[in-house]
Image (spheres, helix red, strand yellow):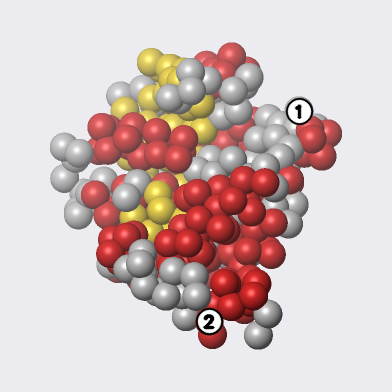
Amino acid sequence: MVDAERAASSRTLGQTWRALRDRFEAAGIPTAALDARLLVRHVLGLDQTGLIAREAEPWPAERGPALDALAARRLTGEPVARILGVQEFYGLSFGVNAATLVPRPETEMLVDFGLGCLRDRPAPRILDLGTGTGCIVLALLANLPRASGIGIDLSAEALDQARANAENLGVADRFEALAGDWFAPLTGGGFDLIVSNPPYIATGVIETLAPGVRDFDPMAALDGGPDGLAPYRIIASEAMDYLTPGGALALEIGHDQGHMVEALLKAAGFTDIGVASDLAGHDRMVTGFARK
Ligand SMILES: C[S@@+](CC[C@H](N)C(=O)[O-])C[C@H]1O[C@@H](n2cnc3c(N)ncnc32)[C@H](O)[C@@H]1O
């Protein structure tokens, strides 16, 4: 055994994750420390407390190849959530697969808005258009025990993931996943809330996105047509037919789409239209209500 190998094999868990953090930092990964900890924890089956408690223990050499394989994927730009197949959203764990977007923290705004609208309703019904992992509607169902919801997506593979997530969260009996184009699979309306985080990137801009998004998120989750607004035109013009009187519509938007989506909702007859910003101060959500 050469010295370098001996040194590596006598590393502690703490030294191992820090060495990985340093490699990630050197590669310019902005979340180097977090990513290194998550990959080491995954390989060892530890939670964060476990990793801290066992920092001084020797690294099990037989787990080295598994960690190297995950680290190599991260170094190609693949996001940790894709490598691990799981992402936290609204304090809940969501499985992700190749056909789903990785849920983003800014999307939690739609859940907050929905909870505000529905908390006092006896048995609210929710529709999530472009549901992906199901993160929006399932986070709402997890927090509203009397609510039920439908998630629609073009991708059957995404819907398989949404159904699995509903099972894991214990809300599968109140959730239905339907395949199809926006409202097409529905046989009726009567929804108290329609939410959607549709694809909203203009086709020509996709090439310029960060590699972790451009190369790993599914194109169907990103491409909003030539000006990024194609899904909003459809959703805004049809949503009213599927809402109860006074029902709400909440749409996630790109930072520069607020005025245009607001205009689409106005043209469709929505009232009390609002544009809300995310924590970074960017326009991120447009909301409106059907007349009572
Ligand atoms: C930006 S992702 C959002 C996924 C999830 N709701 C979230 O917030 O993480 C958009 C989703 O819309 C779906 N989608 C794209 N075009 C669609 C269409 N015409 N009808 C239904 N779903 C569509 C995609 O497959 C993708 O899952």
> How far separated are the C-alphas under marks 1 and 2?
52 Å
Do tag 1 and tag 2 residues touch (Cβ < 8 Å)? no
Q: Which residue is mark 1?
A: 227
Q: Quadrant of residue 278?
A: top left
Label 1, residues with CA under 10 Å away: few <14, some 14-19, many ≥20: some
Q: Nearer the viewer, residue 282 or 165?
A: 282
In percent of width and height, residue 48 lies at 34, 59
| Left or right: 69 in relation to 190 | right
Quadrant where the C terminus lies?
top left
x then y, percent, for residue 90: 35, 46
Q: Secondary structure at mark 1?
A: loop
- Res 10 seen here: yes
The amino acid pointed to by label 2 is Ala
Choose between 289 and 227: the one closer to the eye: 227
Q: Quadrant of residue 78?
A: bottom right
Residue 188 percent across, percent down from the top left: 44, 51
Q: Where the N terminus falls, by quadrant?
A: bottom right
Q: Which mark is residue 191?
A: none
Q: Nearer the viewer, residue 4 or 133?
A: 4
Mark 2 sits on what residue? 61
Q: Secondary structure at mark 2?
A: helix
Residue 41 appears in which quarter of the rendering? bottom left
The type of residue carrying mark 1 is: Asp
Give coordinates of residue 158: x percent, y percent: 57, 63
